[in-house]
């Protein structure tokens, strides 16, 4: 079996959580492979994905790198499948 090495870069501020996680791993390569395979095979959006997206947006808003402006003149149409999926998440016990 042959091996190949790949290089990856991290931002010390934006990726602080990833760097902390990596530092806690006994075998970093195995941990990264396992995380990537879990991401590839799960096949959909999880509650954790939604939570992380909200936290990322919150971080960006606090830093001023993104601004949200509501346009009340436009009609807002929600995707019914998305509404149903989010509603079912709220009903989990």
Image: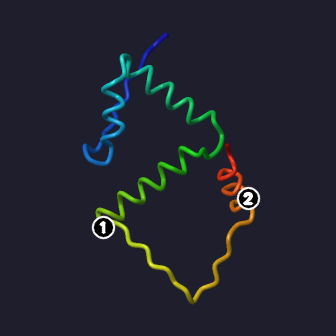
Pointer 1 residue: 64
Q: CA distance from mark 1 to mark 2?
A: 32 Å
Viewer-side residue, 11 vs 16: 16
- The kind of secondary structure element at disc 1 is loop
The percent coordinates of residue 83 (x first, y second) are 69, 62
Tag nearer the camera, 1 or 2? 2
Classed neighbour count for the residue bearing mark 1: other residues with Cα under 10 Å, few (<14), some (14–19), many (≥20): few
Viewer-side residue, 85 vs 45: 85
Q: Is residue 14 above or below residue 69?
A: above
* Residue drawn at (51%, 32%) of the image: 36
Which quadrant does the C terminus fall into?
top right
Horizontally, is 80 left or right of 40 in the view?
right
Q: Which mark is residue 84?
A: 2
* Residue drawn at (45%, 78%) of the image: 69
Evaluate if marks 1 and 2 touch, with contact meaning CB atoms under 8 Å apart: no
Which residue in the rendered view is the most extreme toward the front?
93
């Amino acid at each position: 079996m042959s091996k190949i090495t790949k290089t990856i870069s991290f931002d010390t501020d934006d990726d602080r959580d990833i760097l902390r996680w990596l530092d806690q791993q006994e075998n970093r390569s195995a941990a990264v492979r396992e995380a990537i395979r879990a991401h590839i095979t799960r096949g959909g959006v999880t509650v954790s994905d939604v939570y992380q997206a909200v936290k990322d947006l919150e971080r960006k808003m606090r830093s001023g790198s993104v601004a949200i402006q509501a346009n009340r003149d436009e009609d807002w149409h929600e995707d019914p499948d998305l509404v149903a999926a989010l509603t079912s998440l709220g009903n989990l016990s």
